[in-house]
């Protein structure tokens, strides 16, 4: 039996229990997914949108105050399906042209320029956040339809689910894909059965119509072209999620482009089939848009009977796919944010991969943003939809416009020649005219839909997105300018400043006298430069005690107490450092501060951690260098006691006495070295 004890680092950490043990960088190439798992990861958003796209069409048609016009939902759905097919073909071309992913952002950057690329990036990032908010809110709506008593907890339920999905995605693309594949395929199976049974019962004359539902409309409005266009734009939410696969091509197994293109085709085929099926069956059963019950719930209740096992399975499957549809954004948002951050348009932290080789900063940013949106909008799908699709269709338009420009460039090449893009060479395409025409048609259609959406939904909240995207582009530009300025300042070729000095003045920031103080003093003495210690006197009694303990245990007359009657800490320290810099224009001021380092995040949070604040407070001062001396405080191996490594008063006295004896011996040795050897007289005597 081994008696070897575990060190703290050997024990399983909370993060490991929640998201799994860290993965080595070399395993990144293996964190890819198959076509089947890729369908669950990237297509859940597009497939799930069929659960509310038909309902959004009917909600707008219900404004007429009559169900007589609900039949228009079928031709509207057909028009949307045709648009979906065109966009799918265009994005297949994007996948083959840009195999490293990035979608609309990369296409626009390569063919349209920096500003259109930033607009596409802002639109997509906004869309991903809205996708999480809309899909989770819609999933919660399905649950509330079946269990109305949960209505007061709608927002809390939505935020909790966002937290759960976030946690799963922090475990990695491979694991999250495997987990979320289950609800995706459950929904597909359930909807296939439901629509199949509904059509069978319709053609055999046994399909009933919806009863007991009150139509969600407040005032009657005439049926106009404007209203039809508004219904079309609302139903176009079915196209959301198509771009996700082109953004995440690198997540697929080899051959990446072929697998991604195949998955996109399968996704679009499923999407059109289910969307048209739900729209047709909803017309057959005379489904009515309602605040109390969703269209899917009405279909399930009418086909299988209220409260039946199959009805509950329909609700469960729909709620699951809607809740898990947010996973598409968790796959796309962090990758797109990392691309933009690598180009210097977003904070560089977004390029860092966490322990599970996922872009953890991007995942957390998405989760927090979506949660805030859900809370503000009270988890209402109808309130969120007007904000939703403008960004989608703006990115569609820019992506396809970029592809039109690309195919025109390819048309100028000779067979066998290549066009060098920003990332990869693109070979001559003999069918460039056909592909350019397809992309041009897609550009025109998606642009028209975007305008329709902006106009028809402007007063319902679309104005917010129309303002938000330019604001985001402005911030992207400012971030990019900052990184360029920093790069120029750090460039060795353009060096304008050099710090030439032989003088270093060390200043210790002392809060009290303890083992950490002794460590700082020993560190300062080891540097061999002049040093002094300062203590900010925010508490007279503590200042007096600090001086007494300094005299008793340290002994050097290098402690200066700066009185602070208003209990400010940072301002007196900064003023003192500035005065030292002013008095010594040729010196570097070396600030040394202590830091209590605990062995866990929770225990660390119990302390002031003022070293971080002090460090930030000293930024901007030239000729100032900051060193943090940590005092490690850990639990013992059994975890029952803390190994503080703090000396008692007697220990400190002994340490001081030993140090003084050592200094005395050093002085005697120096004096002895200066004495002449025996039998020789010293010169000058």
Image: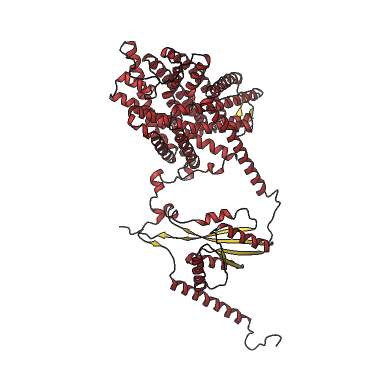
Give percent across and percent down for residue 148: 33, 29
Quarter location, residue 186: top left
Locate the N terminus and report the quarter of the image it occupies: bottom left
Question: Which one is nearer the viewer's eye here, 137 or 48?
Answer: 137
User: Does 299 sit left or right of 610 as displayed?
Assistant: left
Residue closest to the far left: 308
Question: Which one is nearer the viewer's eye here, 105 or 554?
Answer: 554
Question: Which one is nearer the viewer's eye here, 539 or 396?
Answer: 539
Quarter location, residue 296: top left
Query: Is 140 drawn above or below residue 521 in the view shown?
Result: above
Which residue is found at the position 54% from the left and 44% from the top? 349
Locate the C terminus and report the quarter of the image it occupies: bottom right
Which residue is found at the position 65% from the left and 58% from the top? 623
Give percent across and percent down for residue 275: 43, 20
Give percent across and percent down for residue 286: 37, 15
Quarter location, residue 647: bottom left
The structure's colour scheme is secondary structure
For residue 103, say whether it is visible.
no
For residue 125, say whether it is visible.
yes
Number of marks in picture: 0
Give percent across and percent down for residue 268: 46, 23
């Amino acid at each position: 039996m081994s008696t070897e004890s575990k060190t703290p680092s050997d024990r399983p950490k909370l993060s490991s229990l929640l998201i799994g043990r860290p993965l080595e960088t070399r395993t990144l190439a293996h964190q890819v997914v198959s076509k089947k798992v890729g369908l669950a990861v990237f297509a859940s958003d597009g497939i799930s949108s069929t659960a509310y796209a038909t309902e959004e069409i009917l909600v707008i048609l219900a404004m007429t105050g009559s169900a007589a016009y609900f039949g228009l939902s079928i031709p509207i759905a057909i028009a949307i399906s045709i648009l979906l097919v065109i966009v799918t073909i265009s994005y297949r071309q994007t996948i083959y042209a840009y195999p490293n992913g990035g979608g609309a952002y990369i296409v626009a950057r390569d063919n349209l320029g920096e500003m259109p690329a930033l607009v596409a990036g802002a639109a997509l990032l906004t869309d991903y956040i809205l996708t999480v908010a809309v899909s989770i809110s819609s999933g919660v709506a399905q649950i509330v339809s079946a269990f109305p008593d949960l209505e007061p907890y709608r927002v809390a339920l939505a935020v909790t689910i966002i937290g759960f999905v976030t946690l799963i995605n922090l475990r990695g693309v491979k694991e999250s894909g495997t987990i979320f594949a289950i609800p995706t395929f459950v929904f597909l199976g359930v909807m296939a059965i439901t629509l199949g049974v509904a059509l069978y019962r319709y053609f055999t004359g046994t399909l009933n119509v919806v009863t007991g539902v009150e139509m969600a409309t407040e005032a009657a409005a005439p049926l106009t072209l404007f209203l039809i266009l508004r219904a079309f734009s609302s139903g176009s939410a079915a196209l959301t999620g198509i771009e996700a696969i082109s953004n995440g091509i690198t997540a697929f197994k080899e051959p990446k482009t072929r697998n991604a293109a195949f998955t996109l085709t399968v996704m679009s085929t499923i999407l059109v089939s289910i969307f048209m099926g739900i729209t047709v069956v909803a017309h057959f059963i005379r489904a009515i848009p309602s605040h109390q019950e969703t269209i899917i719930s009405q279909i399930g209740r009418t086909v299988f009977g209220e409260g039946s096992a199959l009805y509950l399975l329909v609700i469960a499957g729909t709620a699951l796919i809607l809740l898990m549809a947010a996973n598409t954004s968790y796959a796309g948002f962090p990758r797109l944010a990392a691309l933009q951050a690598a180009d210097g348009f977003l904070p560089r932290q977004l390029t860092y991969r966490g322990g599970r080789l996922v872009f953890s900063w991007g995942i957390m940013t998405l989760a927090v943003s979506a949660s805030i949106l859900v809370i503000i909008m009270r988890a209402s799908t109808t309130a969120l939809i007007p904000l939703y699709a403008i960004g989608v269709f703006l990115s569609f338009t820019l992506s396809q416009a970029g592809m039109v420009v690309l195919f025109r460039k390819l048309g100028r090449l000779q067979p066998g020649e290549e066009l060098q893009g920003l990332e990869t060479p693109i070979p001559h395409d003999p069918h460039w005219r056909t592909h350019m025409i397809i992309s041009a048609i897609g550009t025109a259609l998606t642009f028209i839909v975007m305008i329709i959406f902006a106009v028809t939904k402007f007063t319902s909240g679309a104005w917010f997105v129309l303002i938000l995207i330019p604001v985001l582009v402005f911030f992207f530009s400012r971030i990019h300018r900052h990184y360029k300025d920093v790069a120029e300042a750090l460039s060795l070729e353009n060096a304008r400043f050099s710090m030439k000095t032989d003088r270093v003045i060390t200043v210790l920031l002392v809060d009290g006298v303890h083992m950490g103080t002794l460590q700082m003093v020993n560190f300062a003495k080891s540097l061999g430069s002049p040093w002094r210690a300062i203590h900010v006197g925010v508490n007279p009694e503590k200042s007096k005690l600090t001086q007494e303990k300094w005299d008793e245990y340290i002994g050097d007359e290098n402690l200066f107490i700066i009185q602070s009657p208003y209990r400010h800490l940072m301002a007196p320290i900064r003023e003192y450092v500035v005065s030292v810099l002013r008095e010594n224009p040729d010196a570097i001021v070396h600030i040394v501060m202590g830091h209590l380092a605990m062995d866990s995040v929770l225990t660390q949070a119990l302390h002031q951690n003022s070293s971080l604040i002090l460090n930030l407070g000293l930024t901007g001062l030239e000729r100032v260098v900051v060193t943090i001396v940590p005092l490690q405080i850990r639990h013992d191996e059994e975890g029952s006691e803390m190994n503080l490594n703090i000396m008692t008063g007697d220990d400190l006295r002994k340490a001081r006495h030993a140090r003084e004896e050592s200094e005395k011996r050093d002085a005697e040795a120096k004096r002895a070295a200066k004495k002449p050897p025996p039998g020789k007289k010293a010169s000058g005597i």
